[in-house]
Image (cartoon, rainbow, N blue to C red):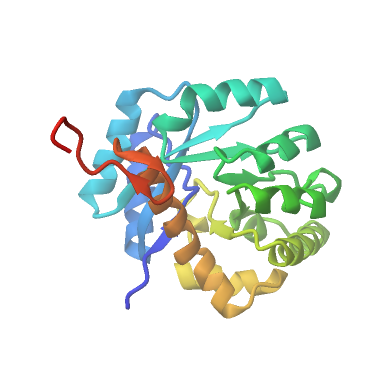
Amino acid sequence: MKKTFSDLHLHANPKKPEDARQLIAKAAKLGYSLIAVPTSPETSQGDMAWLREVCGEVGVDFVSRLDLHPRSQGELLRLLRKFRRRFELVCVVCESKEIARQAAKDRRVDLLNFPSLDWRKRFFDRAEAELASGGLAGLEIDMGLVLVLEGRARVRLLSSLQREIAVAREFHVPVALSSGVEELLLLRMPREVAALAGLFGLDEAEAVDSVSRVPVALVQRNRLKLRSGFVAPGIHVVREGDDC
């Protein structure tokens, strides 16, 4: 069966339409058939519609994604209440341990992203993974960082990723490999991305799943939840009316 490859973190900026078109078109050419573009609460519906249209033109399934950068637990909870049901994916960018812990245990969060290159500020440890395993959040790794860093910086990042992958595996936290890039030259074919993941401990099957089965299942789960008849996992309203 042909695999569906995805990139859930492609930085196609609708404010730079020509660059965005080229990036999305190249992703399609490289073999991605499902992509998500990170947006913020301030992103307009017009920009979202434009991104969806461009994806449709090249035969790519567009996934609406919201990236949250909360400064406190209270702000995170408020944003989740307001925006969760408007997007197919919600990612929390974890820049403090407080935010990371809250996001990991909240079942409305789909992805945890740790942008720091400093291992002391990458908060995906055993406590974080245990919380995530009790919720529904997966760990997102941006492969663009592996490509652009050199020397000691790359070695330190790979070491951090090795620890994070080991912890994720122990607690059965799903891992999604994304590009996290906005430059054409940094895009790689899905299987090339999977091969690079071997540098930090994913075996071949796990790495391929992280650019195919894992992110696709995440999107499918949320699309099902957003349907009008969804009540709870396994429970759906088929028909309403007095004669039911």
Q: Where is the C terminus found, in terms of image quarters?
A: top left
Q: How many marks?
A: 0
Q: Residue at x 44, y 58 (%)?
A: 217
Q: Residue furthest left?
A: 243
Find residue 130 and report its horizontal and vertical position in percent: 74, 53
Q: Residue furthest right?
A: 120
Along the horizontal axis of the image, is 146 left or right of 41? right
Q: Where is the N terminus found, in terms of image quarters?
A: bottom left
Q: Residue at x 76, y 48 (%)?
A: 128
Q: Residue at x 83, y 60 (%)?
A: 152
Find residue 142 and report its horizontal and vertical position in percent: 60, 53
Q: Residue furthest front?
A: 243
Would you identify the image quadrant in which residue 109 lies? Answer: top right
Would you identify the image quadrant in which residue 77 lies? Answer: top right
Find residue 243 and report its horizontal and vertical position in percent: 13, 35
Q: Nearer the viewer, residue 192 or 111?
A: 111
Does residue 201 lie above or below 117 as drawn?
A: below
Along the horizontal axis of the image, is 87 left or right of 145? left
Does residue 212 lie above or below 46 as drawn?
A: below
Along the horizontal axis of the image, is 93 left or right of 62? right
The reply to whether residue 241 is visible in this rendering is yes
Q: Nearer the viewer, residue 244 or 131?
A: 244
Q: Residue at x 21, y 48 (%)?
A: 57
Find residue 133 and report its horizontal and vertical position in percent: 67, 54
The reply to whether residue 71 is visible in this rendering is no
